[in-house]
Amino acid sequence: MTDINDDYNDDLDDEPEDAPETFETWDGFWTEVRAEEDSERTGPDTVVIRGVRVEVPRRLPLKFLLKAESVAKASTVDALHDTVGALFGKEALNAWVEDGMDAPELQVALTWGVAQGSGKDMTFREAYAAVKEQEGKAEQEEEKAAASPPKRGNSAATGARSSRTSAANTGSRRARSQS
């Protein structure tokens, strides 16, 4: 005959399968997280864009994010080169320029790379559609801004003086003219 306490104690000794693991260091923890994320991702490790084999970004390096912000502010060729290099490798932009890549093509490649690096499995066609959608939104905003008249002050539209809104209770103790 088994004692019910023996079964209970045996259950306590068993480590639950979903028990959180403990790590001694940040690096150990983060290595495990990266391994889990990488195992969930599908697709090729590299692709060819304009004749250049580049690694498919699996995450966005902080270096890329910081450089992308500086490109937005500075818009220098060196900053763009550094930013693309942080995502696709140092020689990718030079090779693409030599091969005749144009600005919209670069936008699509960057959109695709950022999506991949962010964990979103996006096709080149989806990246192209996303760029076109953004261009459409930007054009609509420009058209809307051009179509709307410039904003002016209340009375400036006619050049006339403002009309009195209330004779009573204006808080003014001035004598009113009797017309």
Image: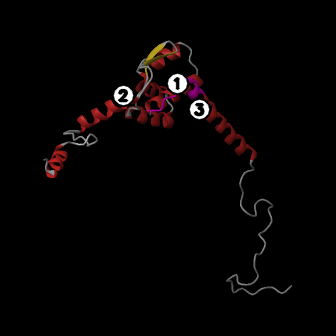
Horizontal placement of 18 versus 9: left or right?
right
Is residue 23 or residue 7 the one in the foreground? 7
Residue at the image position 45 percent from the left and 36 percent from the top: 70
Q: Which residue is mark 1?
A: 109
Secondary structure under the numbered disc 2 in the rendered image: helix
Whichever of labels 2 and 3 marks the residue nearer the N terminus, that label is 2
Q: Nearer the observer, disc 1 or disc 3? A: 3
Inspect the magenta stretch and tell me whether residue 73 lies in it: no
Q: CA distance from mark 1 to mark 3?
A: 11 Å
Identify the amino acid type marked 2: Ser
The amino acid marked with disc number 1 is Ala
Type of residue at label 3?
Answer: Ala
Determine crowd level at label 2: few under 14, some 14-19, many 20+ residues with C-alpha closer than 10 A.
Answer: few
Say which residue appears at 81% left-offset and 85% top-offset. Answer: 177
- Residue at the outermost right position: 179
Q: Is residue 132 above or below residue 157?
A: above
Q: Is residue 143 above or below residue 35?
A: below
Q: Residue 154's x, y, as percent?
A: 73, 63
Quadrant (top left/top right/bottom left/bottom right) for the C terminus: bottom right
Identify the disc placed on residue 39: 2
Q: Which residue is mark 3?
A: 130
